[in-house]
Image (cartoon, rainbow, N blue to C red):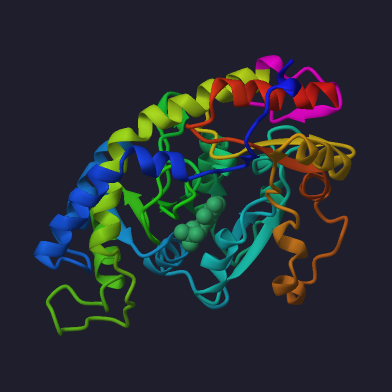
Amino acid sequence: MSDTIKMNKIPCLDLKGQHKQIKAEIFEAFEKVYENTAFSGGPFVEEFEKGFAAYCGTKYAVGVNNGTTALQLAMLALGIGQGDEVIVPANTFIATAWGVSHVGATPVFVDCTADTWEIDVTKIEEKITSKTKAIIGVHLYGQPFDLDAVNALCKKHNLFLVEDAAQAQGARYKGTEVGGVGEMACFSFYPGKNLGACGEAGGLTTNNEAYYTHLQSLRNHGCVVRYYHDEIGYNMRMGGLEGASLTVKLRYLEGWNNRRREIAKRYHNEITNPKVKLQVQPEWADSIYHLFVVTTEDRDAMMKYMNEHNIFPALHYPVPCHLQKAYDHLGYKHGDFPHSEYLAEHCLSLPMYAELTDDEVSHVIATINNY
Ligand SMILES: *Cc1c(COP(=O)(O)O)cnc(C)c1O
């Protein structure tokens, strides 16, 4: 039946609906920043930091200019650099590994599991060497990885745990918001994330005051007192307009996440085509569905079929980190991480954003089931 309804194009993500809804509030917030000329760091960033720390249930949050620099700053604050190794899942957005490479350390990749597609905890220990300093776990697609299991390994081997929560603002692990288990957690507020700034932005959360103080200095030219530089620092502050837009959007985040959960529930309950495999969710994982990834054997044909029905899924991600050209020098090859490689070749991200209508969701489901 839904085939007979004329549908607009349904992309994987459409940011327009969200921004239309909150335009007046955002512009009002921008005006305040403008009148205060508080464009770099400043009170509007601080307000967001307080709000975001409270939302995540952590003591501190530090706003920075994007999620990639948040990861780099985490490595710097932990004293990780040249000669060190950091364990990273092969199935993630490449920026997880950039954080490690940008401080001169080496990312050491680990495969994901065959069904949750999150880091395979049973494959970590064999990668730990005397050079390993940390594990970066990724709450990929908005679904928490097994924090307790990875944390236990970190404790056993005396490693730091960093959460890459770039896709998981508000996701819960065993009932608690992610971002407070590791030494620190890194967030992206790239516009396309569940909580996205009107511009580029990122942040870190931590419960450790020393890290908090150090991160604030590192992002601001290595100084606490202006023009006195205690260490080599960086210019990685968050902008005031970004901070102000995030404060507005933070008020909506839980509602938006819950709408995504509703859509995901329908996908889970109503997609019945046996050719399509959905991500397995352990009972302790409460995802915010940044992405809704499925796999199917004949991915390209199915994508074409969906396009013909005005649905435009995306691929997250078509090449796993260890096979990216940028990491040729690390010597990985095809076959090293079969689950990540399978996923790259068979993944498909279904439309997922809070403003999808029930009819649009029905159309996506019907199209998949008819395929
Ligand atoms: C988006 C993302 C990042 C990087 O964030 P940017 O703000 O784009 O720099 C890092 N890790 C993951 C898993 C991401 O999805």
Rendering coords of residue 306 (x, y %)? 78, 36
Task: Name the residue: 68% across, 33% down.
Answer: 116
State the quadrant of the C terminus: top right
Q: Position of residue 236 (x, y in %)?
A: 34, 71
**Side (left or right) of 173 relative to 51:** right
Q: Quadrant of the N terminus?
A: top right
Q: Nearer the viewer, residue 303 or 258?
A: 303
Taking 68 as reference, is 19 left or right?
left
User: How many callouts does the rendering have?
Assistant: 0
Q: Position of residue 149 (x, y in %)?
A: 57, 36
354 relative to 346, above or below: above
Q: Residue at x 56, y 67 (%)?
A: 98
Dividing the picture into quadrants, the one containing residue 249 is: top left
Secondary structure that dominates the magenta span = loop
Q: Which residues are magenta?
A: 269-285
Indicate the quadrant where residue 342 lies. top right
Is residue 187 located in the magenta-colored stretch of the structure? no
Residue 273: say if magenta. Answer: yes
In this orientation, does residue 305 appear? yes
Question: Is 50 left, or right, of 164 in this rendering?
Answer: left
Q: Is residue 244 above or below residue 239?
A: above
Above or below — where is 295 with respect to 197?
above
Q: Position of residue 182 (x, y in %)?
A: 43, 46
Q: Residue sitting at 71 percent across and 37 percent down? A: 310
- Residue 52 visible in rendering: no
| Looking at the image, residue 192 lies above or below residue 105 | above
